[in-house]
């Protein structure tokens, strides 16, 4: 006696392809999130973060809120209009971060290039900044937002101001 398979009713034949499509559509965003988390865990740099030399960091930088930051060649810095309530000093220091063999990052005066620098204007936590370097439309900009998953708004970005008698950089 031959075994006969029971045929799937016609009304349910569409269900399998629809369920497969729904699973793919609903899980695709999770795949992108998982890929992003893997990138963070593995330490991939953000695509728009760049390494910059000390010469390109030197000069006066301003943001849209009125903060002015001047970085000098001797690692001296001055700042006006630092946001927040902490009383910060006008004079401070800056230096690039370097990676040690242990994998930790430390700011060092001897570093001549980097993707992130520190600037300190007093002992208060609100007077310490990490300056991430980005290149937007051919121009270096600095961002003081500490969260690696966040970016500065256009108004928060520090743009380098041309020195007197120096032509503006071409994009």
Image: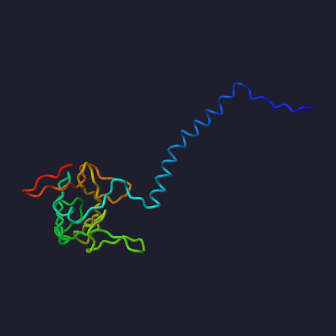
Above or below 131: residue 137: above
Identify which residue is drawn at 24% across, 55% down. Answer: 140
As drawn, the residue found furthest toward the front would be 170
Name the colouring of the figure.
rainbow
Give the residue drawn at x 52%, y 47%: 30
Residue 161's place in the image compared with 97, above or below, is above
* Residue 75 image-quadrant placement: bottom left
Residue 66 lies left or right of residue 143; in this view the side is: left
Q: Where on the picture, by quarter, is residue 145?
A: bottom left
**What residue occupies the far left of the structure in this picture?**
165
Residue at horizontal 22 percent and vertical 55 percent from the top: 158
Residue 134, image x, y percentages: 29, 55
Q: Is residue 100 left or right of residue 162?
A: right
Residue at x 65% of width, y 31% of height: 15
Q: How many marks?
A: 0
Image coords of residue 151 (percent x, y): 33, 53
Q: Position of residue 43 (x, y in %)?
A: 43, 61
Image quarter of the N terminus: top right
Q: Quadrant of residue 109?
A: bottom left
Can the viewer see residue 91? yes
Q: Residue furthest right?
A: 1
| Camera-nearest residue between 168 and 125 | 168
Res. 79 in view: no
């Amino acid at each position: 006696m031959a075994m006969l398979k029971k045929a799937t009713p016609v009304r349910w034949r569409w269900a399998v392809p629809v369920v497969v499509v729904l699973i793919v559509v609903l899980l695709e965003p999770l795949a992108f999130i998982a890929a992003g988390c893997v990138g963070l865990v593995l330490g991939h740099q953000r695509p728009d973060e760049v390494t910059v030399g000390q010469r390109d960091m030197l000069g006066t930088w301003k943001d849209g809120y009125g903060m002015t930051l001047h970085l000098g060649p001797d690692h001296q810095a001055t700042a006006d209009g630092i946001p927040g309530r902490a009383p910060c000093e006008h004079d401070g220091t800056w230096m690039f971060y370097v990676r040690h063999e242990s994998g930790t990052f430390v700011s060092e005066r001897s570093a001549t290039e980097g993707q992130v620098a520190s600037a300190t204007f007093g002992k208060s936590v609100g007077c310490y900044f990490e300056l991430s370097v980005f290149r937007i439309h051919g121009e270096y900009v600095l961002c003081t937002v500490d969260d690696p998953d966040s970016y500065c708004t256009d108004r928060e970005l520090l743009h380098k101001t041309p020195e007197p008698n120096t032509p503006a950089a071409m994009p």
